[in-house]
Image (cartoon, rainbow, N blue to C red):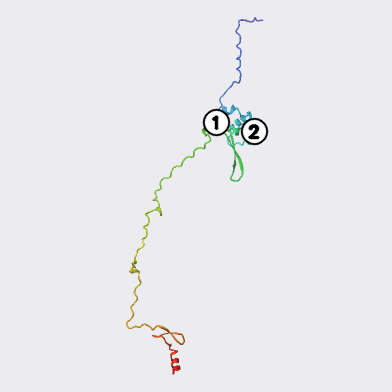
């Protein structure tokens, strides 16, 4: 039986582990998502909400994350998942909007924010400025004259006295009467029958004159 060597060096004792967690970190080359400490160490979000936010951020764009879909994936149930989604929406990690399609159907669009604190610093409640449009180039066409603009009209002055009558607007003179022509006798009213007839003087017409002669004789 061998004699124990009392002067042999003792085996090195394993290192005493430090108090608390130790991280064994290895780099990820694929299938990973970056999560900020503002979410992982949030002092007001529940553990369910933090874990659910990490899961949502790891999904591809277009994946449906309704309460029923998430309840089929996790054992927490619809009530706890619904409460966790409300927490994430309250602290800016999630936004759900109701949108009406052209067909009239209502759908819910969901947006996930990986860094809400940075969003609040970048946009403190003010909308982004609308880019100003460049002024159109000046028109090469001549401007249309304003019918109202122009020299003031000269007021008309009323002329006193007889107004001249332009001779070119007067009608041509009547032709002269032929020589030897006499004017017809004027109309007279017969004293017996009241018929009109032409005669140089008043009296009886040609029909009543012979009757008057016979009566007189």
The residue positioned 61% from the left and 42% from the top of the image is: 106
| Lateral position of residue 61 relative to residue 133, left or right | right
Q: Against 158, is 100 above or below?
A: above
Q: Nearer the viewer, residue 84 or 70?
A: 84
Q: Are marks 2 and 1 in contact (CB under 8 Å)?
A: no
Q: What is the x, y in percent for residue 99? A: 59, 41
Q: Nearer the viewer, residue 38 or 56?
A: 38
The residue positioned 64% from the left and 33% from the top of the image is: 83
Does residue 115 appear anywhere in the picture?
no
The residue positioned 44% from the left and 91% from the top of the image is: 212
Q: Against 184, is 216 above or below?
A: below
Q: Nearer the viewer, residue 181 or 54?
A: 181
Q: Residue furthest front?
A: 216
Residue denoted by label 2:
83
**Quadrant of the snapshot with the C terminus:** bottom left
Residue denoted by label 1:
117
Q: Nearer the viewer, residue 108 or 23?
A: 108
Q: Against 145, is 176 above or below?
A: below
Q: What is the x, y in percent for residue 143? A: 40, 51
Distance between the alpha carbons at the discs numbered 2 and 1 = 22 Å
Determine whether the residue tagged by mark 2 lies in a helix, strand or loop: helix
Q: What is the x, y in percent for residue 47? A: 63, 28
Q: Earlier in the sequence, mark 2 or mark 1?
A: 2
Q: Quadrant of residue 82?
A: top right
Q: Callout 2: few (<14), some (14-19), or many (20+) C-alpha neighbours within 10 Å? A: some
Q: Quadrant of residue 197?
A: bottom left
Q: Residue furthest bottom?
A: 217
Q: Callout 1: few (<14), some (14-19), or many (20+) C-alpha neighbours within 10 Å? A: few
**Quadrant of the snapshot with the N terminus:** top right
């Amino acid at each position: 039986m061998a004699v124990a060597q009392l002067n042999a060096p003792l085996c090195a004792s394993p290192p005493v582990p430090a108090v608390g967690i130790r991280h064994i970190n290895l780099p990820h080359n694929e299938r990973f998502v970056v999560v900020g400490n503002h979410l992982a160490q949030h002092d007001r979000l529940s553990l369910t909400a933090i874990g659910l936010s990490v899961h949502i951020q790891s999904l591809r764009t277009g994946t449906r994350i309704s309460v029923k879909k998430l309840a089929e994936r996790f054992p927490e149930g619809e009530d706890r998942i619904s409460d966790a989604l409300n927490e994430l929406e309250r602290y800016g990690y999630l936004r759900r909007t109701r949108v009406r399609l052209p067909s009239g159907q209502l759908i819910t669009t969901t947006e996930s924010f990986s860094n809400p604190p940075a969003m609040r610093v970048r946009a403190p409640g003010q909308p982004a400025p609308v880019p100003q449009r460049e002024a159109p180039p000046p028109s090469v066409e001549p401007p249309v004259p304003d019918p109202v603009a122009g020299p003031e009209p000269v007021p008309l002055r009323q002329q006193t006295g007889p107004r001249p009558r332009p001779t070119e607007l007067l009608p041509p003179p009547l032709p002269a009467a032929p020589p030897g022509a006499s004017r017809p006798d004027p109309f007279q009213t017969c004293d017996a029958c009241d018929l009109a007839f032409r005669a140089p003087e008043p009296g009886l017409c040609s029909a009543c004159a012979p009757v008057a002669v016979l009566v007189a004789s």
